Image (tube, rainbow, N blue to C red):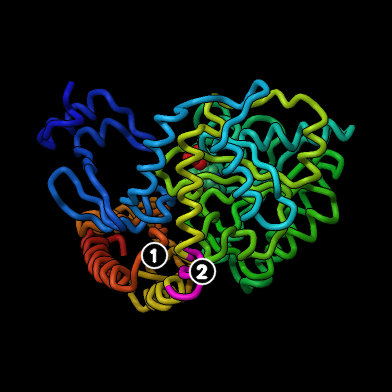
Amino acid sequence: MSIITNHVPTDELQALDSAHHMHPFSTNDELGKEGVRVITRANGVYLTDSEGEDILDAMAGLWCVNIGYGRDELADVAARQMRELPYYNTFFKTTHVPAIALAAKIAELAPGDLNHVFFAGGGSEANDTNIRLVRTYWAEKGQPDKNIIISRHNAYHGSSVGSASLGGMAGMHAQGGIPIPDVHHINQPDWWAEGGDLTPEEFGLTRARELEEAILELGEDRVAAFIAEPVQGAGGVIVAPDTYWPEIQRICDKYDILLIADEVICGFGRTGNWFGSETVGIKPHIMTIAKGLSSGYAPIGGSIVNDEIAKVIGGTEFNHGYTYSGHPVAAAVALENLRILEEEKIVDHVRDVTAPYLKEKWEALTDHPLVGEARIVGMMASIALTPDKASRAKFASEPGTVGYICRDCCFANNLIMRHVGDRMVISPPLIMTPAEIDEMFVRIHKSLDEAQAEITQQGLM
Ligand code: PMP
């Protein structure tokens, strides 16, 4: 069928989509009736749909298109690599240049002794690798019972059975028999929603100390690792109070617990440093990477592992790997993406120019009647919608009802902004210009005003 090359009317594409394509995280029947939006092209921070509308993508796809859309260099590298060596694996005493070069480059960029990379197809696979890595590590060290991984409620670590078990999404745990055994969840550091009467500082310490309580309850000799996103992304861009991370680091050090930083969103410039761990001041033993590694131009992820873990794992046959671990085309594309990030000083520019500009405007959103707190780190940010700021009140409606209305207003105004419950989040391409930020705020204000009118009309506020 020539559907890819010929112009096909939007309604025909929607009908075919509804008949044959199952969408992730969607109610497909409803979606089919409503009709999906068909995205056909993209450039810079803008998407274009099949009706020719230009849409401002404040989510960088799924938090991933860090260098923005439409960079020909990546397309050229991919074409060249496909002609030269489209595929080979690294399982059986072989390797190839893109995997070697990318692993070396990542080791150079990653802090401290994080010098070794195990490649995967994306973040979920990389976190599955991490489960097996840390358990194998402790088994090789003679402690096979040290296999429990502690994570957090409302964390997102992926959609595979292993990674969704690490994640703390209640809706995901309600389907398909997860979590797997020996994963334990503690509470998240979301002061706005759960802080009660505590100050953010007190609350940060209280939530961090839940890790210590869990270790003492489960047994130090049973807990292998703690995994967390430096800034929770899919959970609603939850920024921990300043007291949280130093306490987590202290506890991991004290009890000899491996610290895994899931950098799938935070990595590669999103927080204004190369890695979110640097922004929050932690020293993980393992980092999960994906998304910004290739700016989403090709599917690739991985686990960056420190010298000690690599040494221990290196002493045994690690029976693990994916057909597409270190895929040469994806690796070559990722390498080119990192070259652009580095040579064009995009991370420095985010830290020094773009993020401060965005922050000032973002924090001013709390002037809007619908907006309670505004949180922002680098180029990831969230606002909490509330019927009453002073008491940090939640809406009486089912959580997410108001967020959904607001998200639809954004969509109607050609702005992609996501809702997580009743929080609105953004994670724009890092190359967004001040003028584009201004344009984004025109659309955000219009959408918030319209959402407020709709919510009021529906009697939800
Ligand atoms: N970890 C985090 C922190 C993520 O945000 C995501 C994806 N949103 C994943 C893991 C899973 O990555 P993937 O979808 O590439 O499997």
Q: Residue at x 22, y 61 (%)?
A: 454
Q: What x and y, as percent, mark residue 35?
A: 19, 38
Q: Nearer the viewer, residue 3 or 226?
A: 3
Quarter of the image that includes the C terminus: bottom left
Q: Which residue is mark 1?
A: 385
Q: Residue at x 13, y 31 (%)?
A: 6
- Residue 94 placement: quadrant: top right
Counting from the top left corner in percent of width and height, residue 205 is at: 71, 66
Amino acid type assigned to the residue bearing label 2 in the image = Asp
The picture places residue 450, in percent across and down from the top left corner, at 22, 65
Q: Dividing the picture into quarters, in which one does residue 445 lie?
A: bottom left
Q: Is residue 134 above or below residue 56?
A: above
- In the image, the segment drawn in magenta is 345-353
Binning the other alpha carbons within 10 Å of mark 2 as few (below 14), some (14 to 19) or many (20 upward) gives some
Q: Are marks 1 and 2 in contact (CB under 8 Å)?
A: no
Q: CA distance from mark 1 to mark 2?
A: 31 Å
User: Quarter of the image holding residue 5?
Assistant: top left
Residue 348 is tagged as 2
Q: Mark 1 or mark 2, which is nearer to you? A: 2
| Mark 1: secondary structure | strand
- Image check: 93 left or right of 75? right
Image quadrant occupied by the N terminus:
top left
Q: Quick one: label 1 or label 2, which is nearer the N terminus?
A: 2
